[in-house]
């Protein structure tokens, strides 16, 4: 019986070793127990390792599925392409303003850093922003603004062309790494082009020559100076009660306590507009005030 158990053990376990010397019955029993114990430990260990990887993959898949579902629910949202230094600053401000946005970044390490900082409080897509399928995953068809801050003008240009092809109505804001690329970016479909170097140079010149003016502008650009005040450009929607009213008749300051700074007609902004100017559908009003006041005007300007 012991020989039968012993031979069965080394056969089923596929050990199949040859004895160095003859084993006693006790030795055969010990060897059989050792074989099955070893197999049990190996199988248990492999099972746990496999379970760890499979469950990890499943958790990752479920997280991705949930995020994708949340992204596809968005409407009129922002897409931030590029999570470098500029992109990170934009993301930080968008989170503070509680805006709906999706980050598109191909470097997974950058996304991990952002997740550590903001504890996954934002939606993101890992992939090349210049590819159709990645932008579609970011729900570009329902987005209202795309911000392109990729590392090169060539990538930014290709992204603009791709974005406009997928959503011709989307507003595109891009950074020009090289000032000489601005014309190409505009021809590619960029609505607004920001050149950091030119802005920095203009700011330095203005600070040197118009110190008082810069100090005044800083009051409205730094939240630490006047907490809660912000500029907002509000579009007058079709069916709004503001349509066909003059600024005087609209009584925006009376109804909302906002300051009307400008009136945009056909893309041209008129600062300090006259009270008799007529407000029409799709025109925009630039105002200064607090968030709740701005929200009230947005409701009035909508249908």
Image (spheres, grey):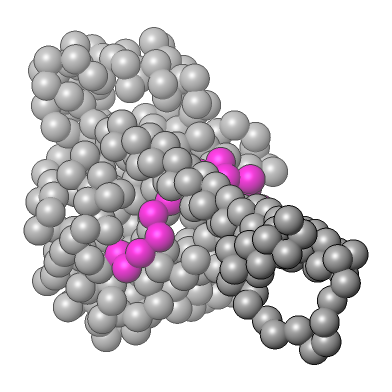
| Residue 134, horizontal then vertical, whole percent | 27, 58
Q: Residue at x 25, y 68 (%)?
A: 130
Which is more toward the observer, 110 or 39? 39
Q: Visible in this render: residue 211? A: no
Which is more toward the observer, 258 or 15? 15
Is residue 8 shown in magenta?
no
Q: Residue furthest bottom?
A: 20
| Residue 66, horizontal then vertical, whole percent | 42, 37
Q: Residue furthest front?
A: 1
**Quarter-wise, where is residue 74 in the image?**
top left
Q: Residue at x 21, y 58 (%)?
A: 133
Please determine whether, in this image, residue 226 is positioned above or below residue 102. above
Give the left or right position of residue 129, taking residue 119 as reference: left
Give the left or right position of residue 287, taking residue 40 as reference: left
Viewport quadrant of the C terminus: top left
Which is more toward the observer, 129 or 212? 129
| Residue 260, horizontal then vertical, whole percent | 37, 30
Is residue 125 shown in magenta?
yes
Q: Which residues are magenta?
A: 117-129
Count of labels in the image: 0
| Residue 226, horizontal then vertical, whole percent | 64, 37
Q: Residue at x 38, y 41 (%)?
A: 65
Please determine whether, in this image, residue 242 is positioned above or below residue 205. above
Viewport quadrant of the N terminus: bottom right
Q: Visible in this render: residue 289? A: yes
**Quarter-wise, where is residue 265 in the image?**
top left
Q: Residue at x 48, y 46 (%)?
A: 58
Which is more toward the observer, 12 or 217? 12
């Amino acid at each position: 019986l012991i020989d039968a158990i012993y031979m069965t053990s080394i056969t089923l376990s596929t050990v199949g070793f040859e004895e160095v010397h003859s084993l006693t019955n006790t030795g055969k029993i010990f060897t059989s127990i050792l074989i099955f114990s070893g197999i049990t430990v190996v199988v248990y260990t492999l099972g746990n390792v496999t379970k760890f990887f499979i469950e990890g993959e499943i958790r990752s898949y479920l997280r991705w599925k949930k995020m994708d579902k949340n992204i596809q629910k968005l409407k009129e949202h922002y897409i931030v392409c590029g999570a470098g230094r500029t992109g990170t600053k934009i993301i930080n401000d968008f989170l503070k303003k509680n805006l709906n946005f999706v980050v598109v970044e191909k470097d997974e390490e950058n996304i991990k850093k952002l997740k550590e900082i903001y504890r996954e409080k934002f939606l993101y897509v890992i992939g090349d922003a210049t590819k159709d399928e990645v932008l579609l995953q970011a729900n570009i068809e329902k987005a209202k603004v795309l911000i392109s801050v990729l590392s090169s003008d060539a990538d930014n240009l290709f992204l603009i062309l791709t974005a406009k092809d997928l959503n011709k109505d989307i507003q595109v804001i891009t950074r020009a790494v090289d000032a000489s690329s601005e014309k190409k970016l505009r021809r590619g479909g960029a609505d607004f082009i920001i050149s950091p170097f030119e802005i920095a140079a203009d700011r330095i010149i203005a600070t040197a020559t118009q110190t008082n003016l810069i100090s005044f502008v800083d009051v409205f650009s730094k939240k630490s100076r006047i907490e809660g005040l912000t500029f907002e450009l509000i579009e007058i929607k079709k069916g709004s009660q503001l349509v066909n009213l003059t600024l005087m008749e609209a009584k925006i300051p009376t109804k909302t306590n906002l300051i009307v700074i400008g009136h945009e007609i056909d893309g041209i902004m008129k600062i300090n507009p006259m009270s008799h100017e007529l407000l029409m559908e799709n025109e925009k009003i630039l105002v200064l005030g607090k968030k709740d006041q701005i929200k009230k005007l947005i409701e009035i300007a909508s249908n």
